[in-house]
Amino acid sequence: MSTLPITLNQSRSTWAAGRTALLALLLRDFTVIKKDYKIFILRTIIQPFLLCFVFLYVFPKIGQSVGGSSKRAASGADSFATVLVAGVVGISVMFQGLQSVALNMAQEFGFTREIEDRVQAPCPIWLVAVEKVVSGALQGLISAALVLPIAAVVHARGVQASMHIHWLIVLTLIPLAAVAMGSLGLVLGTAFEPRNIGLMFGFIVLPITFLGGTYYQWDHLAPIKIGSFHWLQTLVLVNPLVYVNEGMRAGFTNAPHMHLYVIYPVLLAFFGVFLTIGLRNFRRRVLS
Amino acid sequence: MPHTTTAPVIVTEGLTKQYPGADTPAVKGLDLSVSAGEIFGLLGPNGAGKTTTAGMLTTRVVPTSGRAFVAGIDVVAHPTRAKQFLGVVSQANTLDRQLTVWENLYFHGRLFGMNAATSRDTANALLEQFQLARWAKASVYALSGGMAQRLMVARAIFHRPAVLFLDEPTAGLDPQSRLALWDILEQLNRDGQTILLTTHYMEEADQFCDRVAIMDHGQLLALDTPANLKRGVGIDTIVTIKATGDLVAFAARLQAFEGATAVREIDRGLELHVASGDRLLASVVAIADELSIAIQDLSVAEPTLETVFITLTGRELRD
């Protein structure tokens, strides 16, 4: 025992120890993903694949109208494909962020109690939570890269999404969306009791998904109003996925989208608020 | 005791924790000093404040007032720095379920700043030392309770902490695993590892701890070596008598016995505490005969830490 090498530099600064710990935690997360990479890929692509398959292959084949008010069916399908492809990337980033952070956290807080050991890491407690967000965000980026080809490939003959990639937007907005959604995962993972984590999907994830502008542009909600009040268009503004999807539309297509001057600041604000709340919750959960 | 007093590695001053909403503090004004190389036991019933004390020392519980130092570092003011010097084995199994046995150790090393090669070598050496080498590639789900506990100890000492903390380490283990764990802890201690553990098993505290702090209701009742604690109660002998008949009269006569310090009623009998006495058993039997009391069983024992606890609190440890 006493022959074991003692190489730990115990006088490391907090900053150096924190950086080392962060990298080690990320290394651990990606080792786990690498072990089950098939499951990771399957989990990532199943939903986008089904969305594209049903909406861009099955619907056009059976003549189901998905093109909204467009007069000509073919161009209706094309413009819907254009809208959906961007939305599918957005929704994948969201799912990956929520799932990898919130579900893992529920498990570690819940029956395995692993979190008790994780917070003994020689770094500030907040860094343990931030690592989860970073890890979730990186997984979100991988998802986006996996999903885009599917959206481009899976569709019926004749249906074509018109893609125009604006790299500057893509390369800034996807990471921003990924960290914002990872932070939302942190909020949900720390706010829900581990045994109630299933409720999260019903009450939070489903509404976000269906009212997040994946299947339609935000400004197309305008006709839904009471009197002159565009109630649905106003209501969904609290949904962060709306900005993600509008941003993806700006990045991947020439389709009309919400103004970038709105998308960036609002997503930044969501990121800030989610991270602040998430870190506060996390601290409360692990310290007493 | 094998260890002489050296520089204290754990010091607490007036350490107090009041949980929000609780009527009384979980720990109240605790002053402790643990020397390097000691096996130090916090002994007490459930709710005595042992786990809260260990929690404060390991940065998980933030004290309401008072101070605590581990390896000279103020754990409240500098928790991140202090964590480099702490090894913690908590009550629950906190092994990383998504990693193998070997990976649980390897990534712990990386987390504490060791490079890949050192982490790998240390992980291999520890698995060997803790007799877990053949499980290296197994999922931690495959481990029995005792093996999981050993792996947690291996993980906790991986980074050579100044103090190894164990919260109720043998609770829920079968007797064989319990002995195996104590073998390991004693070996680590012989190599110089300071160990602080909480337990409600007085036999363990008695047998393995260099010093024991007895806690109840968040307060320190006594702190000394097990031998001194037992000596301190002023009892040589405990006579346990299982008997039927007029036990009240019997107790009154035994109370008047020379050297008797206490007579307690126990299940179907009496317990007599004696400071010193000659021909003790013969006298007890004579008195029982006189009162026509039928003795079923008579046993003599030395005082235990249980006796100490009863003397201090008037209650049994397991109440």
Image (tube, coloured by chain):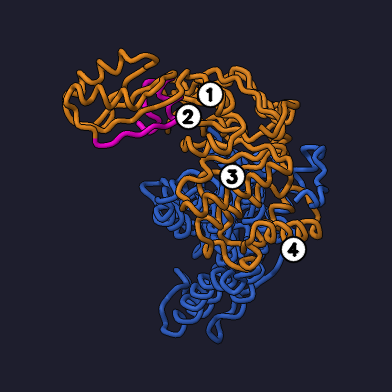
Q: Vertically, is A198 above or below B7?
A: below
Q: Mark 3 or mark 1, which is nearer to you?
A: 1
Question: Same chain, marks 3 and 4?
Answer: no
Q: Measuring 43% from the left and 46% from the top, which residue is drawn there?
A: A193
Q: Mark 4 sits on what residue?
A: A167
| Mark 2 element type | helix
Residue A64 image offset from top left, x and y in percent = 41, 78
Q: Residue B80 shows which numbered tag?
A: none
Q: Dots 4 and 2: beta carbons under 8 Å?
A: no
Please state if A101 lies on the left or on the right of A205 as rendered: right
Q: Chain A rendered in what hue?
A: blue
Residue A159 image offset from top left, x and y in percent = 55, 81
The quarter of the displayed image where residue B9 is located: top right
Residue A25 image offset from top left, x and y in percent = 68, 53
Q: Residue B89 shows which numbered tag?
A: 3
The amino acid beneath tag 1 is: Leu
| Mark 4 element type | helix
Q: Nearer the viewer, residue B222 or B105?
A: B222
